Image: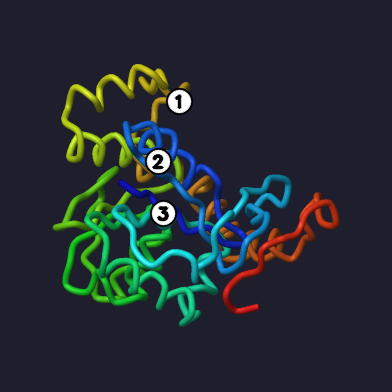
Amino acid sequence: MRLSILIFDGLTTLDAIGGYEILARLPGMETEFVAAQRGIVAADTRRLGLAAFRDFSEVTATDILYVPGGPGAFALEKDEIFLDTIRRLDKTSTWTVGICNGVGLLAAAGLLKGRKATTNWFYQDRLRAYGTEFVAERYHRDGKYITGAGVSASIDTGLFLTSLIAGEQVAKTLQLGIEYYPAPPFPEQRPQDVAVEIQERIRRFESEGGKKQLAMEPAFKGMFELSRSAHG
């Protein structure tokens, strides 16, 4: 079974790595990180990178198509090369996964129209604009489409998909293996439980801060060949 994780400049790393830490450990899983071109893909913090060792042209089919999110995903909603890659690989996949606003990339590609999906809490109106019904859940299944909420929900989503592929016992074994029994130090259980001023701080960051981050050069520029996005 092949897991293809599409990565891009400005992704939020845990969106990808949360699910990777679960799904890549399934027996027989072949995992690949895929980008518009081979090289190091800089995360949104500009202090971390992931290695794309295959480019779009090298991947013709996959069993699990996995699309994370991050500030860099917003521009890709209008990038036809990236969206065509999603559509092409989705035609071959048994499962297609979106995490955080990576769900928006699936929606922008036309895959979630008329379906239900979850995403991060501040993206829900934009998701609806693509004709997708937002559901306020950590993870959600609609047919072969598995969607996860913001960032840390990638772990929950990976465990859920593992239970569908390999059964509950395997999923529970992996949950123990990564010791995932979250007990947050703060009492809020849902995004809507958080104080309004904190919500607004995050909204401001998502509308302004992400762009400022992406304008920064990666700290490791010049040390490695950096992968570029499909649009340039």
Q: What's the distance in space between the residues labelled 3 and 1, CA to CA?
A: 35 Å
N-terminal label among 1 and 2: 2
Residue at image mark 1? 186
Residue 216's place in the image compared with 165, above or below, is below
Q: Is residue 172 left or right of residue 192?
A: left
Looking at the picture, tell me which residue is in the foreground, 157 or 85.
85
Q: What's the amino acid at mark 3?
A: Ser
N-terminal label among 3 and 1: 3
Residue ID at (33%, 39%): 158
Whether label 3 touches label 1, CB < 8 Å? no
Q: Is residue 17 left or right of residue 51?
A: left
* Circle nearer the viewer, 2 or 3: 3
Q: Which mark is residue 4?
A: 3
Residue ID at (58%, 54%): 53
Q: Quadrant of the C terminus?
A: bottom right
N-terminal label among 2 and 3: 3
Mark 1 burial class by Cα count in 10 Å: few <14, some 14-19, many 20+: few
Q: Position of residue 211 (x, y in %)?
A: 65, 66
Q: What's the amino acid at mark 1?
A: Phe
Q: Position of residue 42 (x, y in %)?
A: 67, 55
Q: What's the distance in space between the residues labelled 2 and 3, CA to CA?
A: 11 Å
Mark 2 burial class by Cα count in 10 Å: few <14, some 14-19, many 20+: many
Q: Position of residue 33 (x, y in %)?
A: 51, 52
Looking at the picture, tell me which residue is in the foreground, 32 or 8.
32
- Dot 2 falls on a residue whose secondary structure is helix
